[in-house]
Structure formats: C-alpha cells, structure tokens
Amino acid sequence: MSILKNKNAVITGGSDGIGLGIAEAFAQNGANLILIGRSIDKLEKAKLQLAKYPVVIHLISADLDDTNQITWISEEITKCFSKVDILVNNAGIGKFVPFIQTEEQLLDLHLNLNVKTPYLLTQKLLPRLIENKGNIINISSYLAHRMLVGRTTTAYSLTKGAINSFTKSLAFEVGNLGVRVNAIAPGSISTPQFDRNLSSLPIEKQKAFHEMVKSIYPLEKIGNVEDIGKMAVFLASDDANWITGAIFAVDGGLTTN
C-alpha cells in the first residue's frame, strides 16, 4: 500500500526514536523523505535502515535548538525538494528537573527546540505547503495536561501545551489555504533512549515501572514507534482530508484517567 506515493515529507529529529518510526512508516507508504537531526552518523544509519524502500531520502545535519539555523535549514530543504507536502515537527527535548532547580538556560533550551523551532520552521515552509495543499503534524505529549507522580515536568509540559495551542490556532488560520495542522500526543513509547533509561534503573525500580504501567494504562502496556508511525501516515494521507486542528492521544488509554 502506498497512500503517500509521490509525497515529499520533512521530519525533524528523524534519525531515531519516534522520528525514525514515522520516517519508516512514511517510506513504507511511498513518501520521499528529508530527515533532519544533529548527528550525521545517526542520520546515515537511519538512511541505511530505510534503504530497502524505493524512495528518495535526503539528510540534513543541523542543530535544531539553534533557531539562527532555521533559515539555512529551510533553504537546504528547498534544494532537496522543490515540493513539500508534509512537515513533521518531531524534534524535542525533555529534561525532567524540579521546578525550583530549573535554570533559565534549561528553560530556554526547551522553549527553543520544542516551541520556537517548530514555529519558525513551519513559518518558513508554509508557502511550499500552501502550494501543495500539504499538512503539518506536530508531536505533542500527554504531559501537556496529564501529570504523573514523581515526574517533574514543568519546562517540558509548558512547551507541549504550547504546541497544542499552536496546532489549533494555526489550523484555524491556514485552513482556508488548504493546509491541515494536527498533533499526535504519545504516551510512553519504547524508543532506544527510553529503553536505555529504563534498563539503567535498579531492578526493583524497573519492576515498579512495569507495575505502574499495568495500573495506569488501560491496555496495560506502553507503545512503540510503529503505533505513532501508523497514526502519522493516516494524518498525512488524503484519508484525513477533513481533519485539522486536532490533538490525537495515542497513549494506550493513559489519559482516560
């Protein structure tokens, strides 16, 4: 099935984790890709993983937390593809430091990468998206509105709340131009980084985490990148052509309680 055939997609943070999961789902469905990330080694590894799909893949190595690079990044995107159909604002950071210990530098890092970069990159690419009646997918989080005991997330949560508001307000503003804007709010997702963090905990804490998952997730399990990739494919496709301004909880039911 190739419901994204001949579509060109830009994915920030596309070299691993959720971003790479979305990239693979897009490639499976025929989309050409531009993957943006900091590490060229990780980008090259991602491209090798996706080489089995008959699509065009470009790589852009950039520090997305440096908003001064946004103009250059957008110019590089245009060099790769004159046509842009899909923008996935996935790159982000989450450092869960207690509020009282969150220094301004750390707050700025969250604001730059999680809010300013998607805002400014979307602004730069909007003319291309308008030309092609394209769509934007922002990656939010359940932590925009659902807190967990022991997770100190003020900096991260405020940025994901901002992304939700950005999604709705931009959808309202550009809908008449033929551009759709939606967000996916994942629950806990098994990514290499998540798995490394979990395995670094003492065994008793790992067991406590798995017990917590059974108690707060109605489906009694965390998700995987394929779960997010499938939703992203749907939202990017013409099957979702009457959906905009929505934030989709892909979280195993976590936010039902």
Image: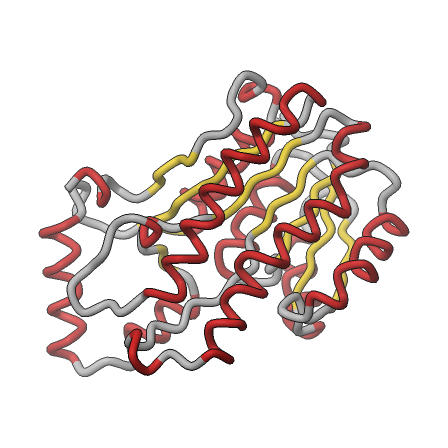
Q: In the depicted view, which residue is nearer to us: 59 or 66?
A: 66
Q: Check the picture and name the quadrant holding the C terminus.
A: top left
Q: Quadrant of residue 156?
A: bottom left
Q: Position of residue 28 (x, y in %)?
A: 61, 39
Q: Position of residue 204 (x, y in %)?
A: 11, 78
Query: What's the residue at 74%, 38% (across, down)?
Result: 126
Q: Check the picture and name the quadrant holding the N terminus.
A: top right
Query: What's the residue at 72%, 45% (across, down)?
Result: 123
Query: Relative to 108, is 134 on the left or the right?
Result: right
Please say if 10 is above or below 192. above
Please say if 164 is above or below 133. below
Q: Is residue 2 visible?
A: no
Query: What's the residue at 61%, 58% (across, down)?
Result: 116
Q: Is residue 67 visible?
A: yes
Q: Residue furthest top?
A: 242
Tell how many labels: 0
Query: What's the residue at 35%, 40% (across, down)?
Result: 250
Q: In the depicted view, which residue is nearer to us: 40 or 86?
A: 86
Query: Relative to 153, is 253 on the left or the right?
Result: left
Query: Relative to 150, is 224 on the left or the right?
Result: right
Q: Quadrant of residue 8?
A: top right
Query: Relative to 242, is 178 on the left or the right?
Result: right
Q: Position of residue 6 (x, y in %)?
A: 77, 31
Q: Quadrant of residue 206?
A: bottom left
